[in-house]
Image (spheres, rainbow, N blue to C red):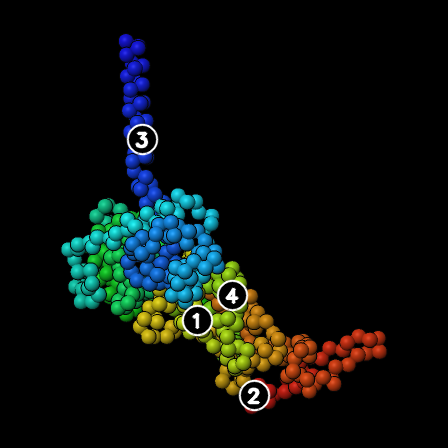
C-alpha cells in the first residue's frame, strides 16, 4: 500500500514537471511578449509608435518586413556605433529622422532585445469595444442623468459592483493653498468637453499612466461612466469655489466696533457698569486696534505679498528649476534684453514635452493641456504673480543683464516652490534698501564703463565698494518718470 502511494506521488510530480517544462519550451513567445511589452513601454514608447504614425522616430509597424531581424537587434543595441561604422541603412535612417540620436541599449540582453522585436512583430491594435451608450456625447444630457452622475461623483450612491467611490477625494472642487497633483473636477470637465480633450471612456477603462492605474482601483461600467459624463458636461461651465479663509482682521474690527458702541451707550445712557475706567479701557483698546488695522490695510494697499494663485496648468518650479536644473532664462528668455521676462509660449514647453509625455506626479493630464492648447490654437491663460503698479518702471534687462542679479533676489527660492508665490512685498522701501546694499558689478560690464573712475582704493589698499545708489540708483526719475 505504501509503495503504491509513493509510485503515485512520483507520477504526479513527473506529470507536473513535464507540463511545466513543455509550457516553458513550447511557449517562449508568451513570456517574451509580456516582457517585450514592458521593455517597449519603458525604453521605446517615448520616441516610437506602432501603427499610429511617426513620432520622434519612425513607426515600427512591420519593421521586420523592411529590415532583417539581426540588423534590427544590432541597431537597438547600439545605433550610433553602426552609424559611425558607416552602415548605409543606419546612416539613411539617421538622416531621414532629422539626425535624432537614438540612445544605446547595451544594458539589454540579446533575449530582451529579441522580446522587444517579438512584441512589435506580434502587436495587434486593440479591438474596438462595442458600447450600448453614446460615448461621443458631450452635451444635451437629461436632468436626471446629470443628477445621477453628480451622486456617483460624490460617492453618494454605490457602483454596480457594490463599491463606493468619492471622486472628490482626489479631484478637488475648491481652490487650495497646496498643490493637488490630481486634476480638479473643473479641469476634468473642461478637458472632457474640449473637442481635442479627454476621451473619458478610454481613460476610465484603459488608464493611460501608472499613476492613474494605481489610483483607479475600481471598475465602472459604461452606463456609470455615461452618468459621470453628464455631470462633467454640466460642470464644465463652472469655476472652482474659492477656498474660504477665516477673516480674522474683519472679525476683530467688528468685535471692537461693537464693544466700543456698547461702552459709549452704557457710559452715556444705561450706566450699568459703575466704573468708568472700564469704559475708558474698552475705548482706548478699541481705537488702538482699529488704528492698527487701518495702518495694516493702508500699508498693504496694492501690495500682494504671499499671493499664490492657481495656474491653468500645474507647473512646478520645484521639479523644473529644482530637480531638473533648468535655467530660468531658458524659459524666460527675454529677461536678458527686455523690460519683461515674458511667460514662455507653448512651443517652448514642447521642446521637452515632445519626448517627456508623462509627469511623475500628474501623469499625462497636465502635459496634455499644452498639446491641446497648441491643437486648438489658443494660448494658455497663465495668471501673473508679480505685478508692479503702472506708475513704476522696472526693467528685467537692467537687473538681470546689467546688474547681474540672480532671479531669487526678487522672486525668492523659486526652485523650491511647487506653487509660485510673491515672497517679497516689492514696496518702494524694499527696492531702495536693495539699491543701497547692492554693489555695482564693474568687472566685465561695459554698461558701467563710464563709472570706472568711481572705483577707488583707500589708504590701506582696501577696495571701496560702489553701491547702486552711488550711481543714481535711488533717483526718483529712475523708476517714476
Alpha carbon distance from label 4 to label 2: 34 Å
Q: CA distance from mark 2 to mark 1?
A: 34 Å
Q: Are marks 1 and 3 in contact (CB under 8 Å)?
A: no
Judge whether residue 246 can be spotted in this image: no
Report if the CB atoms under discs 4 and 2 are less than 8 Å apart: no
- The first of marks 4 and 2 along the sequence is 4
Residue 348 — which label?
1
Tell which tag, 2 or 1, sits nearer the viewer. Answer: 1
Per the image, label 3 sits on a secondary structure element best described as: helix
Q: Which residue is mark 2?
A: 480
Q: Secondary structure at mark 4?
A: loop
Helix, strand or loop status at disc 2: loop
In whole angstroms, how far apart are the C-alphas of marks 1 and 4? 13 Å
| Image position of 398 with respect to 160: above or below | below
| Residue at x-position 28% and y-position 24% | 15
Front: mark 4 or 2: 4
- Image location of residue 13, percent across then percent down: 32, 22
In front: mark 3 or mark 2?
Answer: 3
State left or right for residue 235 relative to residue 318.
left
Q: Mark 3 or mark 4, which is nearer the start of the sequence?
A: 3
* Crowd band around label 3 with a 10 angstrom C-alpha radius: few (<14), some (14–19), many (20+): few
Q: Residue at x 20, y 55 (%)?
A: 128
Please name whichever residue, 291 or 200, is drawn nearer the observer in this view of the structure.
200
* Of pointers 3 and 2, the one earlier in the residue sequence: 3
Q: Position of residue 428 (x, y in %)?
A: 58, 80
Residue at image position (26%, 63%) is 232
Pick whichever of labels 1 and 4 is earlier in the sequence.
4
Report the residue marked by disc 3.
20
Q: Residues within 10 Å of mark 1 (few under 14, many from 20)?
A: few
Q: Is residue 252 above or below residue 42?
A: below
Kindly indicate whether the residue at mark 2 contacts the one at mark 3 (C-beta within 8 angstroms). no
Which of 169 and 252 lies nearest the eye of the viewer?
169
Amino acid at each position: 500500500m505504501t509503495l503504491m502511494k509513493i509510485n503515485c506521488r512520483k507520477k504526479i510530480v513527473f506529470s507536473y514537471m513535464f507540463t511545466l517544462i513543455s509550457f516553458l519550451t513550447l511557449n517562449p513567445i508568451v513570456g517574451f511578449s509580456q516582457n517585450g511589452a514592458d521593455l517597449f513601454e519603458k525604453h521605446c514608447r517615448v520616441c516610437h509608435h506602432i501603427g499610429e504614425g511617426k513620432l520622434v522616430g519612425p513607426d515600427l509597424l512591420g519593421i521586420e518586413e523592411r529590415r532583417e531581424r539581426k540588423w534590427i537587434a544590432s541597431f537597438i543595441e547600439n545605433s550610433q556605433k553602426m552609424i559611425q561604422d558607416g552602415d548605409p541603412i543606419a546612416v539613411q535612417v539617421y538622416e531621414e529622422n532629422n539626425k535624432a540620436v537614438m540612445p544605446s541599449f547595451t544594458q539589454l540582453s540579446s533575449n530582451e532585445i529579441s522580446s522587444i522585436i517579438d512584441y512589435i512583430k506580434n502587436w495587434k491594435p486593440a479591438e474596438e469595444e462595442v458600447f450600448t451608450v453614446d460615448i461621443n456625447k458631450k452635451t444635451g444630457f437629461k436632468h436626471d442623468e446629470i443628477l445621477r452622475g453628480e451622486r456617483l461623483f460624490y460617492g453618494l450612491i454605490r457602483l454596480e459592483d457594490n463599491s463606493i467611490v468619492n471622486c472628490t477625494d482626489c479631484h478637488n472642487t475648491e481652490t487650495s493653498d497646496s498643490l493637488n497633483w490630481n486634476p480638479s473636477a473643473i479641469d476634468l470637465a473642461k478637458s472632457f468637453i474640449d473637442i481635442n480633450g479627454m476621451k473619458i471612456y478610454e481613460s476610465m477603462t484603459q488608464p493611460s499612466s501608472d499613476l492613474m492605474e494605481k489610483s483607479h482601483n475600481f471598475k465602472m461600467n459604461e452606463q456609470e461612466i455615461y452618468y459621470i459624463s453628464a455631470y462633467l458636461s454640466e460642470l464644465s461651465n463652472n469655476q472652482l469655489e474659492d477656498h474660504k479663509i477665516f477673516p480674522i482682521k474683519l472679525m476683530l474690527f467688528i468685535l471692537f466696533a461693537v464693544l466700543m458702541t456698547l461702552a459709549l451707550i452704557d457710559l452715556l445712557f444705561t450706566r450699568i457698569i459703575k466704573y468708568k475706567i472700564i469704559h475708558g479701557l474698552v475705548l482706548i483698546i478699541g481705537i488702538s486696534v482699529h488704528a492698527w488695522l487701518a495702518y495694516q490695510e493702508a500699508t498693504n494697499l496694492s501690495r500682494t505679498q504671499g499671493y499664490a494663485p492657481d495656474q491653468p496648468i500645474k507647473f512646478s518650479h520645484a521639479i523644473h528649476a529644482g530637480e531638473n536644473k533648468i535655467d530660468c532664462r531658458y524659459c524666460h528668455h527675454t529677461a536678458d534684453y527686455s523690460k519683461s521676462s515674458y511667460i514662455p509660449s507653448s512651443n517652448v514647453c514642447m521642446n521637452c514635452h515632445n519626448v517627456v509625455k508623462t509627469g511623475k506626479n500628474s501623469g499625462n493630464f497636465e502635459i496634455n493641456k499644452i498639446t491641446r492648447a497648441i491643437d486648438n490654437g489658443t494660448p494658455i491663460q497663465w495668471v501673473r504673480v508679480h505685478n508692479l503698479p503702472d506708475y513704476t518702471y522696472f526693467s528685467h534687462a537692467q537687473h538681470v543683464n546689467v546688474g547681474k542679479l540672480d532671479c531669487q533676489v526678487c522672486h525668492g527660492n523659486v526652485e523650491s516652490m511647487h506653487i509660485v508665490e510673491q515672497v517679497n512685498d516689492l514696496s518702494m522701501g524694499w527696492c531702495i534698501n536693495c539699491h543701497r546694499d547692492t554693489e555695482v558689478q564693474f568687472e566685465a560690464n561695459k554698461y558701467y564703463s563710464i563709472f570706472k573712475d568711481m572705483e577707488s582704493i583707500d589708504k590701506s589698499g582696501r577696495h571701496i565698494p560702489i553701491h547702486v545708489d552711488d550711481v543714481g540708483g535711488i533717483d526718483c526719475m529712475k523708476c517714476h518718470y
